[in-house]
Image (cartoon, rainbow, N blue to C red):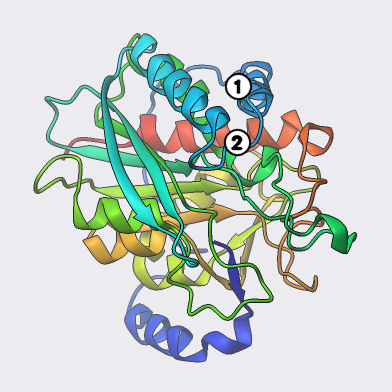
């Protein structure tokens, strides 16, 4: 991540999606029977604290001490929440040949349950502020408060409830590494230099033959004024999951944030999870009219705690928790 493809460049995807949707009831007309379940309270203060703690380690760039310390903390936090934790370590190769010691961290809740939901976020931070307004800092690493830490913070707050208040389905939280070590924007790249951790996981899942009913990726879900459009690759691979999540957000009063319109397509971790065979969506802050397609401080030194909003964390966290707890074993 994060290569943004404007909507007009995705005409082939749109045609495939349109063809696949013919004969189906439109999402506006769908009225699913919502099960009466109790959803634990998502604590936005707690999620915010988890975001801040990640940032406090420093730049979480593979190969650094901050990266190693953050990995230890994340694994310990998931274990303390009652998860069975797997650390998937590998040395991956970056776009410039740099060897990256990486670690995907998986927390499995109720691993004995066959029906599962996969929740994902990347936990590394970008080594380059390649869109910083000051050219002198464009090879400087960033805090990654929104781009990485926000999604992880939301998932850790969800994890805090899963053991004591288990949903019907099993849940796996997959924290992916080496997502944001892609080539700087002024270097040619075909997109394959991004999401190295999810590429590795798709080839070597933490459990042979692993399956989940669907997946939800959280990326850049904490900035003030966030808007989440229906990302186009999610629409192609997992439109029913998008419908489910956006409907839950609307019921909770967050339709002003979860915009029921198509956004662009994003090269992100969900691409490789989908190719593996799990229909997975990307909840990601898009600003299609901006010059990058993303929030104003994307890949700059401004991606820090100053711009994290608890209201946004809560909206995303409550929505995802609602979807998970309403999921039935069929």
Q: Marks 2 and 1, how far apart in space?
A: 8 Å
Residue at 48 percent across and 63 percent down: it is: 194
* Residue 197 makes an appearance in the image: yes
Q: Is residue 313 above or below residue 9?
A: above
Q: Is residue 89 above or below residue 204?
A: above
Judge by depth and name the residue closer to the eye, 30 or 295. Answer: 295
Question: Which quadrant: the C terminus?
Answer: top left
Q: Is residue 323 above or below residue 2?
A: above
- For residue 29, the mark is none
Judge by depth and name the residue closer to the eye, 237 or 239. Answer: 237
Question: Which quadrant: the N terminus?
Answer: bottom right
Q: Using the rendered view, name the quadrant where residue 3 is placed.
A: bottom right
* Of pointers 2 and 1, the one earlier in the residue sequence: 1
- Percent across and percent down for residue 18 are 42, 84
- Percent across and percent down for residue 40 are 48, 17
In the figure, is residue 21 to the left or right of 310? Answer: left
- For residue 50, the mark is 1
Residue at 33 percent across and 62 percent down: it is: 272
In the figure, is residue 89 to the left or right of 119? Answer: left
Q: Residue furthest right?
A: 134
Q: Do callouts 2 and 1 mark residues in contact (Cβ within 8 Å)?
A: yes
Residue at 42 percent across and 38 percent down: it is: 323
Judge by depth and name the residue closer to the eye, 288 or 320. Answer: 288
- Percent across and percent down for residue 149 are 60, 36
* Residue 26 makes an appearance in the image: no
The local secondary structure at tag 1 comes to helix
Judge by depth and name the residue closer to the eye, 201 or 282. Answer: 201
The local secondary structure at tag 2 comes to helix
Q: Using the rendered view, name the quadrant where residue 306 is placed.
A: top right
Crowd tier of the residue under label 1, counting other residues whose Cα lies within 10 Å: few below 14, some 14–19, many 20 or above: many
Can you identify the residue that label 2 sits on? 149
- Percent across and percent down for residue 13 are 44, 84
């Amino acid at each position: 991540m994060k290569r943004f493809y404007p909507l007009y460049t995705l005409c082939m995807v749109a045609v495939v999606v349109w063809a696949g949707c013919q004969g189906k009831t439109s999402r506006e007309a769908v009225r699913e029977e919502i099960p009466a379940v109790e959803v634990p309270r998502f604590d936005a203060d707690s999620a915010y604290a988890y975001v801040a703690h990640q940032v406090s380690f420093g730049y979480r760039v593979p190969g650094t001490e901050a990266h190693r310390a953050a990995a230890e903390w994340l694994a310990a936090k998931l274990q303390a929440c009652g998860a069975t934790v797997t650390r998937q370590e590998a040395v991956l190769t970056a776009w410039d040949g740099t060897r990256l010691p990486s670690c995907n961290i998986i927390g499995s809740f109720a691993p004995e349950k066959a029906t599962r939901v996969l929740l994902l976020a990347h936990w590394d931070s970008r080594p380059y502020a390649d869109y910083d307004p000051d050219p002198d800092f464009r090879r400087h690493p960033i805090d990654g408060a929104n781009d990485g830490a926000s999604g992880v913070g939301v998932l850790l707050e969800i994890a805090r409830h899963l053991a004591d208040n288990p949903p019907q389905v099993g849940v796996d939280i997959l924290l992916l590494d080496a997502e944001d070590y892609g080539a700087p924007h002024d270097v040619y790249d075909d997109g394959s230099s991004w999401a190295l951790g999810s590429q590795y996981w798709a080839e070597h899942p933490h459990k042979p033959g692993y399956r989940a009913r669907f997946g939800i990726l959280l990326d850049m879900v904490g900035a003030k004024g966030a808007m989440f459009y229906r990302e186009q690759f999610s629409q192609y691979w997992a439109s029913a999951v998008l419908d489910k999540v956006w409907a839950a957000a609307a019921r909770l009063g967050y339709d002003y944030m979860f915009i029921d319109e198509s956004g662009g397509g994003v090269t992100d971790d969900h691409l490789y999870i989908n190719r593996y065979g799990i229909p997975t969506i990307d909840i990601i802050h898009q600003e299609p009219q901006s010059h990058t397609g993303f929030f104003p401080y994307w890949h700059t030194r401004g991606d820090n705690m100053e711009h994290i909003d608890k209201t946004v964390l809560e909206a995303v966290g409550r929505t995802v928790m609602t979807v998970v707890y309403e999921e039935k074993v069929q």
